[in-house]
Image (spheres, coloured by chain):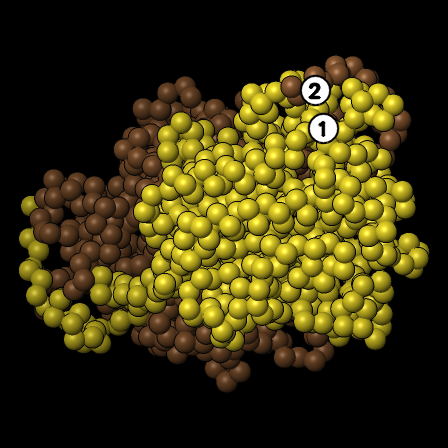
Chain colours: A yellow, B brown
Amino acid sequence: MGKPKNILFIMFDQLRWDYLSCAGHPHLQTPHIDALAAEGVRFTRAYVQSPVCGASRMSFYTGRYVHSHGATWNRVPLKVGERTIGDHLRDAGMDCWLVGKTHMKADDEGMAWLGIDRESVIGARVEQCGFDVWERDDGMRPEGPDGLYDEKYGAAVYNDWLRENGYHSANPWHDFANSGRKDDDPQEMASGWFLKNARKAAAIREDDSETPYMTSRAIAFMQQAGDTPWCLHLSYIKPHWPYIAPAPYNDMYGPEHVLAVARHKRELTEAHPVFKAFMDGRIGKAFSRDEVREAVIPAYMGLIKQCDDQMGRLFAWLRDTGRWDDTLIVLTSDHGDYLGDHWMGEKDLFHEPSVKVPLIIRDPSPQADVTRGSTCDALVEAIDLAPTFLEVAGGAERPHILEGRSLMPWLHGQTPDWRDYVVSEYDYSMNPAVSKLAKDPSSARLFMIADARWKFMHAEGMRPQLFDLQNDPLEYVDLGESAAHRDIIAQMNDRLAIWARRLSQRTTRTDAQIITERGRSPMRGITLGVYDEADLPQEMTQFYRGRPRPDQPS
Amino acid sequence: MGKPKNILFIMFDQLRWDYLSCAGHPHLQTPHIDALAAEGVRFTRAYVQSPVCGASRMSFYTGRYVHSHGATWNRVPLKVGERTIGDHLRDAGMDCWLVGKTHMKADDEGMAWLGIDRESVIGARVEQCGFDVWERDDGMRPEGPDGLYDEKYGAAVYNDWLRENGYHSANPWHDFANSGRKDDDPQEMASGWFLKNARKAAAIREDDSETPYMTSRAIAFMQQAGDTPWCLHLSYIKPHWPYIAPAPYNDMYGPEHVLAVARHKRELTEAHPVFKAFMDGRIGKAFSRDEVREAVIPAYMGLIKQCDDQMGRLFAWLRDTGRWDDTLIVLTSDHGDYLGDHWMGEKDLFHEPSVKVPLIIRDPSPQADVTRGSTCDALVEAIDLAPTFLEVAGGAERPHILEGRSLMPWLHGQTPDWRDYVVSEYDYSMNPAVSKLAKDPSSARLFMIADARWKFMHAEGMRPQLFDLQNDPLEYVDLGESAAHRDIIAQMNDRLAIWARRLSQRTTRTDAQIITERGRSPMRGITLGVYDEADLPQEMTQFYRGRPRPDQPS
């Protein structure tokens, strides 16, 4: 057993970093994920590049900051020309497949402009942010008066499969997998969209529900995979909303298992304008109600418990088939979930429950034996996975494109020279309530800088936020206006400026090419600043001396 | 006569802003360019986005900062996916053609990756930064021990034409158009590369030399142009080196017409490290010699005089054919030339002789009558031309892609709310001497911020430079370490940071689309933060109430 041959890149959606027993949750036991951590490294400070699905994922897939790739929010198309892990891995001889969610929105206009046919292999990959699609399912099939949120990738195959298996309705994803039934009328749907229904059992057999279904699809992919090394992105929608779980998971946890809410009254009175706008929104208000938390959190825990059981099933299959020994396994999430902490629901902002994610990596190779079962508190970013994968695939580094750094040294017990701070971003221009704070959609932007101790947030045109993670780990005390912390804030502003000025778009030339090309133009005849032929370097003199006399024109 | 129908976008290469009589040169009379200024607006503070050919041009053509498009130096490919004026204008129904130089290096790797065939119309445009090519000639055919600098676009067609016209040699561009003959042996070539030969007559009939040739090619294009509105980029290589002019232009000016050099001893003793590295290079040393300036500057003036005479010929043709009345004419340069000022030759840095360019625009429409013959001191950037052209073509604004702003209000006598400062950049990673100052090729970067009074230069990892353009218009006194100017420097750093954080890559969504899409997800069924169905908005309630009861699975 040497370097891993394959990569299994498992992503959950909206899984908080601390809702795992290996991360310290006292009530939620996740033995299978814990077992992966026991054989790998659990990164305790892994941050996403943006705490919202689409933007975060495009950073995972491109290995580039949101400020670089431009897909700043859900359904903002990733522009043609942005390479992804699929492109990089295939260059290194590794296939790259998708089972599940990406939230990719294709750049239809760009593809049309460049004549890229989505029916071609190249076009299909551009459309799917570089993946070959085994099954794409963005995991949701919401429907409202304006129609479906996503006709094509919203659980369409899964819905067909459900119907084939006896779940008859126009949208079994909603009506069975994500709805319970009313207590007073067991034939009447109780939609999972309504938070009060969260603890009901979804009207579906557990093994027909989304998480086991997607696990089966991943196993089906791996069963047929040939000798070519592969990376499989197995991307689950759960524990993302709708918050409703099939039996028995709906009933495993109750209000007695809900942790104390992490919020403080001073957050309401001293709120930064952007934070306040989110807290004052419908979601913030709802998750500040005890009855909402007591309904939703047990369901959320049940969904995670089901995910963990599916990890047990998946890992058993990997062990049985030998894949456990030749596959690098990565388990992470695209962002967290506030769950009422900080008077917030959902994600969007930069408190730890939202922007920090679980990240466990198991490298089967002997070089990783020294780190098995350890944790690593290095400041890790989502963009670090792409270069990690490229190293596994044996490809040359591409720092002129990939802005992250390979995590392999950490897995092998080395202590590389590492970054001092992580960066995350958020575009709130799509939020009708919050966007009132920005003068136009291009100004509605937030940046986070977090280092070992401090977390800083910059909002264009507004005051900063600052939290001392060491003395205030729950992030209650905003020091953004503290005179005693001016130097820290100035340092954070400097770091943000250095980061913002970074060279992110010179992607068509490697550093090595630049060094090779340096100073070559004289040898191709561009001899600047030479007054007299006698001043030429010898090789150029020979070149000029050897030239024939031109014929004068007739 | 209403809005102009066509655009004639004339660019010279390395033409200093102040080497025109309309800009105050006391010895160099440029009556034809002056006549254009007399009927248009001359912008007195127009800056290029980078004082080097390739990067500057890619900003002119894309309407985007170098930090956004990534083609940071000569021969760094412009990546596939960057749209240019050709793409924008064609969308608005205007053709966009090239006669002359672009310095475009195609992104071969990106084109291959995306399957874009350069033999197709789309591929040809991607390869040519959006232009349809009437004749591309990057204006130089240097050759050295390693071969030709540019086989394909380096005066290849012109060389064939010269040979057909009796100039027999392997490289008549060099041997005739850019070389004189030795005094002691009139058959022996005296290469224009050697600065001591600058005042010799190029061994070519004046009307066969490059500037008249390219003017003829532009006239040939316009003669055959049909009714479709066109933008023609007529892009001359001159007065760019080799500094040698055909008779009579070689002999029109002498040392007595060379202006006093603008340099100061304190520049040598107090030099910023980057500035010092350039000054200490072969070019800086050469142009600090009087004999070099006295040879080169008269030749440079002669080349400009020839350019002006060709403008006379071109403008006469336009008047004779009616094109003068339906064509917006723009005359500018891609950067300037130090010519020994500040102990420098060439360009590269941010002193006014290098980074400021001539910019004259004549709009034939009556709305522009109020500004004819005026100057405008607004802070203009090269990226402003693309949105100006798009407005002429009648296309909708594209601020999500184009980072400049239309100059049409200035041409029509309005005073728009305008930027407070301009930005220019420079990547010195390709310069073998100067690049020693940077720890790697991605750190070798400079930024300039200039406002109405101050000019600030930031070099990554080094001290800043600051000049007071009001009290020190020749930029001799570097205030970068002046305690009295700390606030100005801090303000300039803030401006640089704001600029660097700007949203430049969200090019796949317009502001209007974002505003339209705001808050639409509930109407497509994403109903977050709703505890009870009774809390739903009315239209959503109807939607839920109207749903049929699902059949339970068999």
User: Can residue B122 be seen by looking at this rendering?
Assistant: yes
Position of residue A454 relative to residue A11, above or below, is below
What is the distance, in whole Å, between disc 2 and disc 1 at their CAs?
8 Å
Chain at numbered mark 2: B
Return the residue at label 1: A203
Q: Which quadrant is home to the N terminus of chain A? A: bottom left
Chain at numbered mark 1: A
Give residue A162's quadrant in the image. top right
Q: Amino acid at mark 1?
A: Ala
On whether disc 2 and disc 1 are found on a single subunit, the reply is: no
**Mark 2 residue crowding within 10 angstroms, few (<14) / some (14–19) / many (20+):** some
Residue A432 relative to residue B84: left or right: right
Q: Is there a contact, CB below 8 Å, between mark 2 and mark 1?
A: yes
Secondary structure of the residue carrying numbered label 1: loop
Q: Residue at x 63, y 79 (%)?
A: B481
Residue A417 relative to residue B537: left or right: left
Percent across and percent down for residue A103 are 58, 38
Q: Which mark is residue B552?
A: 2
Q: Amino acid at mark 2?
A: Gln
Position of residue A119 relative to residue B315, above or below, is above
**Mark 1 residue crowding within 10 angstroms, few (<14) / some (14–19) / many (20+):** many
Q: How many marks?
A: 2
Q: Which mark is residue A229?
A: none
Give residue B311's quadrant in the image. top left
Secondary structure of the residue carrying numbered label 2: loop
Q: Which of the pair B494/B537 is nearer the observer?
A: B537
Q: Residue at x 80, y 59 (%)?
A: A463
Q: Which of the pair B65/B382 is nearer the observer?
A: B65
